[in-house]
Image: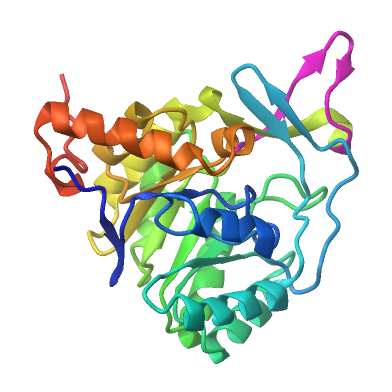
Amino acid sequence: MSSTKTTIGNYEFENCLMNAAGVYCYDRNELEQIINSDAGTFVTKSATLNPREGNPLPRYYDTKLGCINSMGLPNLGIDYYLDYLLELQKTHPDRTFFLSLTGLSSEEIHTLLNKVYESDFNGLTELNLSCPNVPGKPQMAYDLEATEKLLNKVFEYFKKPLGVKLPPYFDIVHFDEAAKVFNKFPLTFVNCINSIGNGLVINDEHVVIKPKQGFGGIGGEYIKPTALANVHAFYQRLNPSIQIIGTGGILTGRDVFEHILCGAGIVQIGTTLQKEGPEVFSRITRELEEIMDEKGYKTLDDFKGKLKYL
């Protein structure tokens, strides 16, 4: 029988599927639905120091091939998620979860990470360097000089497992330059990719979301080729100790299979989870297992990163 177990850093997960930050992760109610699903783990909503309401409504819109959103980081603040995760460490001591956080300045990021480091949280921390939907705030990960400066300071004090959530890169040179920066640090993982920033969807003669005159992040089926390219490009370039989480365009077990083939160790589901709910993990896990059984693969390592070229 095939197994979808996986590991990230020193942590083992019963299933390689989880939610993507931003979906089914705003509060305890949503996160508990993920705990009680077939997902292997969850990630919390990217937290800021203080609670945020986010951008004005409507800020999310389903499309035929995915979605567009400009949420603006609505979240309940770092203390809410940290307190909840510390509770889970007592009630679910055999499970590991991801805490996502992001700051609107370098100072805020350091304040958040110091808070996590000084806490008893013993899971994985994800630093989101790729939020495309806060008006007036550029994505940190597109400024590699600023990213390197930030990570230099972070790793002076942060000694717990840490990964970064990345935006999509679109140029081979950018893959090379970004990997050169990330390889300088003891990152546990990189997460590829966040939504493709600043798309525009039109219905009749109107934009479909209110913030930023309709500009928003694109997710879903549209972005799978870009996500796969980023996963594989970083799999080729990063130190083997830095694992990859694949995010983007997961509708079926075949999509998960392709992310793992490109080098992902865990795969996150966003738009499809938003549309179908947490029962989606059962369907997609079953579809992945069927592909593995058909090909004679017993574990993910049997095909992880083994993409074939012409």
Q: Is residue 294 left or right of residue 184?
A: left
Q: Would you say residue 203 sits in the magenta stretch?
A: yes
Residue 114 image-quadrant placement: bottom right
Residue in the foreground of this view, choosing between 283 and 304: 283
**Magenta stretch bounds:** 195-211
Rendered position, 67 above or below 185: above
For image coordinates 78% across by 31% down, the residue present is: 215
Q: Is residue 138 left or right of residue 150?
A: right
For image coordinates 16% across by 39% down, the residue present is: 303
Q: Would you say residue 240 sits in the magenta stretch?
A: no
Residue 242 image-quadrant placement: bottom left
Q: Position of residue 147 (x, y in %)?
A: 54, 62
For image coordinates 59% across by 79% down, the residue present is: 113
Rendered position, 43 above or below 211: below
For this orientation, the residue located farthest to the left is: 296
Q: Is residue 203 left or right of residue 34?
A: right
Rendered position, 72 above or below 269: below
Q: Position of residue 194 (x, y in %)?
A: 56, 44
